[in-house]
Amino acid sequence: MGERIRILALDHFSGQDREALVAAGGDGFAWRTIPYWRFRDPANEIFPPEVKEGLESWARPELAEHRRTFHAWCRRTITRLYLEWPFDVLLLPSDSFYYVRALPELCHELGIPVFVAQKETTITDYSMAEHAPQVHAFAPFISDRMTVCSERHKRFWVEAGTEPTAIEVTGQPRFDVYAQPRSQPARGRRTVLFLSYEPDAYLLETADREIGWLDLQDETERVLYSSNDHAFDVVVKLHPLQNRAAEAAAFEMKAGGNPRIRLAPEDADTRELILEADAVVGFQTTALYEAMAAGKPIAYTAWGASYERFAPLLIPFDQRDDLLQVVRSGEELASWLREPPSVDAAQHVRRLTFVEEMLGPFDGKASTRTLQAIRSETEKWSSRAATSPRRRMLGRVRLIARPMLMAAAAVQLAAVRVGATLPGRVGKSAAFRAPHHTERLAALRRAG
């Protein structure tokens, strides 16, 4: 089946991977994207708040009726999405989210596969030992096929109960950019990129989060921001989960209006910031692997009481001082910043070997491999799609209902532009309540 494949993609902070796939796919694929909150928000209205606390909460037996109610809502929504734009495959960044657990079964009714291109990359030893059994018990893989970045990531999902033949190692599409040739701009002052983080990041228990990384973070920022006499600029990249308003206010106070210290825009691409930087300072983040692949000098901040206590649970960057500089105090960081050592050829080879062990191939072909896997799985389902009674029925309904669906889509687009709340169900849009649409509405209701 060499024709164009229509991919309905759920976006959950996965835009960089999707953009890489769109660019690599060319005319062979058509795309429509829906935001994760289109399913999450209705789920949060149906389920009690504790469902957001972890995988086990969603699976509790007493929530069976909630799951049935949400399943019915999802069925109507998938029906509507298919009637608006008949897709060939649903693409998810994960199927562990509680608000997408119903989707594979509902897509299968239409003869449509569900493909997971895993967004997450780094797997710590702690996650392998503790998180994989939880996934196995409460949110095992229920889609049809998945791609992961590395053999290590594949091992996590096998430990979580996934059939190995359902997993393909492709590399991470968003990392293809690091294999693309780039011209180096003329350099003036050096730029140091600081990868900021939440003060309770990677800590699981409430008491641990109250301890947090505030001392480490404050001391790191003090050293960076007090470097007025150093010959470098500082760019601060906030983590997407940080409270930007609060962090921006704190930044203004700490930076003191120094024009050599700036906060990266909210929509700044971390990959571009890494490629443009002369050196990188960070803590626990996959971006440090990316900085290794990009050949950047790196300082990994590793000091303080909280660090000493929780280091065994973290990504063990502190054990690879042959690949980056592990700084054990603010004074060591200040000394390193004066002249970050360059990365020689032998170190770069060691780095790439390490990075590919953790994140998979960085050869620039991850997007192509992922798309080939998506096409292969979709083609496997083509016979089921052709014989799906529900799909054939919705095809007939669509011929009747298409003018109404176009009108409803226009209403939705207008609502998005003015910031209004979108209708949550098929029957709530004004376009569906018009008297002359009665026959078509009845058909839609029978379909749902």
Image: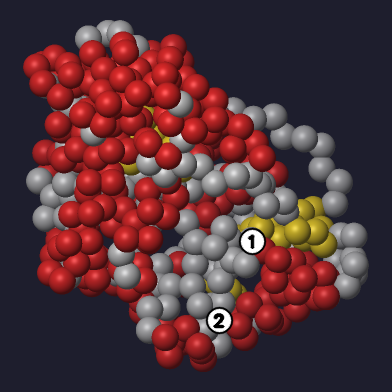
Amino acid, disc 2 = Trp
Q: Position of residue 67 (x, y in %)?
A: 20, 57
Q: Position of residue 121 (x, y in %)?
A: 37, 52
Mark 1 highlights which residue?
238
> Farthest residue in the front direction?
435
Per the image, label 1 sits on a secondary structure element best described as: loop
Asked whether residue 198 is in view, the answer is yes
Mark 2 highlights which residue?
213
Residue at image position (90%, 66%) is: 258
- The one nearer the camera, 380 or 202, is 380
Q: Is 370 on the left-hand or right-hand side of 378?
A: right
Residue at image position (30%, 64%) is: 47
- Picture quadrant where residue 111 is located: top left
Amino acid, disc 1 = Leu
Asked whether residue 377 is in view, the answer is no
3D distance between C-alphas at marks 1 and 2: 15 Å
Q: Position of residue 407 (x, y in %)?
A: 49, 22
- The one nearer the camera, 66 or 337, is 66
Q: Are dots 1 and 2 in contact, CB under 8 Å?
A: no
Quarter containing the C terminus: top left
**Label 1: how many residues lie within 10 Å, few (<14), some (14-19) or many (20+)?**
many
Q: Is 372 on the left-hand or right-hand side of 333?
A: left
The earlier-in-sequence mark between 1 and 2 is 2
Quarter containing the N terminus: top left
Q: Is residue 245 above or below residue 102?
A: below
Per the image, label 2 sits on a secondary structure element best described as: loop
Residue at image position (62%, 67%) is: 243
Q: Is residue 171 above or below residue 411?
A: below
**Label 2: how many residues lie within 10 Å, few (<14), some (14-19) or many (20+)?**
many
